[in-house]
Image: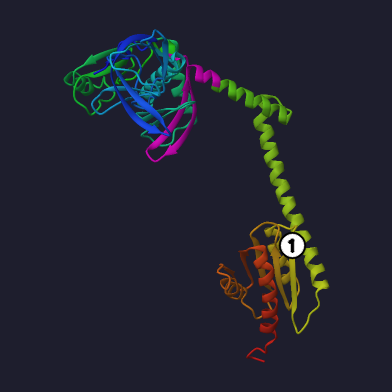
Amino acid sequence: MTDRLYYDDAFLKSFSAQVMDIREASRANGVSIWQIALDRSAFYPASGGQPPDTGIFTATSRNGATLEIPIEGVEEDDQGEVWHFTRKPLLAGTAVQGSIDWPRRLDHIQQHSGQHLLSAVFARQLDAQTVSFHLGETASTIDLSTGPIAHHTLERVERIANEIIAEDRVVTIRTVDRREAQALLAEGRLRKLPERDGNMRLVDIADYDLNACGGTHVRSTGQIGGLHIRSVERVSRGTRVEFVCGQRAVVSARHDFTLLHRAGLALSVGRDDIPAAIERLQSEAKSSVKERQKLREDLAGYHAVRLAVEEMIRDNLRLVRRVFTDRDREYVRLLASRLTATVPQTVALFISAESDPARIFLARSQDMQLHCGEVLREALAAYGLRGGGSSDLAQGDLTKEQAAELSAKLTADLRSLLARPHPTE
């Protein structure tokens, strides 16, 4: 098995090793992905919510040329062997110099150690246990087995975590057998114990947290560089907390500052006055929506009167048929309702063709013996479409071409239906 150098020194940036095995992992479009196993490696394989390291292998070919082999990922197989993914193969026995992508590794060290600390604070302050951890490209998350957390509680947790970071407490790593680990768990000193046999690697934040973990970590809490809780949301397993540490916290703060600055410029106010300015805009927007709705209703009322005047009653029926290409569906629906509520002996057959599909509306005044929902549903069914509504108002969607044809057919059917004598006459 590969000797995992990061266990003893997470800050090791380069190392020498020998290729022990190589195999083709996959092939696509003539390009192979190779897996290389070394006798020793400082590359961390994806595990426990922490992404793998990347970096470079440097080797010397038989003709003396220097080869640089990018390492795109690292995984551990079921047997515990560490495999390095690359697009360039190397022969077994080749001596290599491995170089870790250090900025990436340091970032992962800060986030992972920050997670240990944050989880410990939540456990101590709220008895909220961490059930999962994910280290993402821009932010990390922990899922807690707890309900909603108040904002002031989050602030307290964040403050305590940053106080411990500022204290620069020593972080040590040691390996114990399972029996000792179980004893530490029983004493309440060990936060949790993995369900596996063999020796356990324990990460100890001095006088605050002891936890089993195989990941890379800081040497002291000061190297975490600060912790900022970004957001909280409910998830099926409890509560998800998003956070950033170290340089990510700086980048996050700069991003937020830039957004606030731009928002302040757009609102012509200082950063501290942005919330009040937004509240004012929201209030004005609500007033504008109410005013706009009233204007639409007034317009629909005047429009309905004009349509009633334009269309005369024939055979005891005022059938108003119109196609609107510049009016939205809601206005056309409102207009149909206003027209049939305003004047008697009226049926409105309106089409809103502003968008595709078009929407057809059929409405009637209270004195007309017609069930709009049944009539329109039957007419649409002939085209394999669905629609319907109440006896007073019905609607359905169809293409603009179908709308024109259906409108003409419905006009003829309605005149024929409503011209027939009623049984009571």
Which residue is label 1 attached to? 324
- Circle 1 packing at 10 Å, graded few (<14), some (14-19), many (20+), is some
91 part of magenta stretch: no
Decide: is 400 above or below 250. Answer: below
Image coordinates for residue 143, horizontal then vertical, percent: 39, 32
Decide: is 399 above or below 18. Answer: below
Per the rendered image, the range of residues in magenta is 224-251
Image coordinates for residue 388, horizontal then vertical, percent: 58, 69
Image coordinates for residue 405, horizontal then vertical, percent: 67, 71
- The C terminus - image quarter: bottom right
Q: Main secondary structure of the magenta part?
A: strand
Asked whether residue 368 is in view, the answer is no
- The type of residue carrying mark 1 is Phe
Image coordinates for residue 407, horizontal then vertical, percent: 69, 71
Q: Residue at x 45, y 11 (%)?
A: 166
Q: Residue at x 39, y 41 (%)?
A: 236
Asked whether residue 36 is in view, the answer is yes
Taking depth in this image into account, of 310 and 118 the one nearest to the observer is 310
Taking depth in this image into account, of 79 and 128 the one nearest to the observer is 79
Outermost residue to the front: 63
226 part of magenta stretch: yes
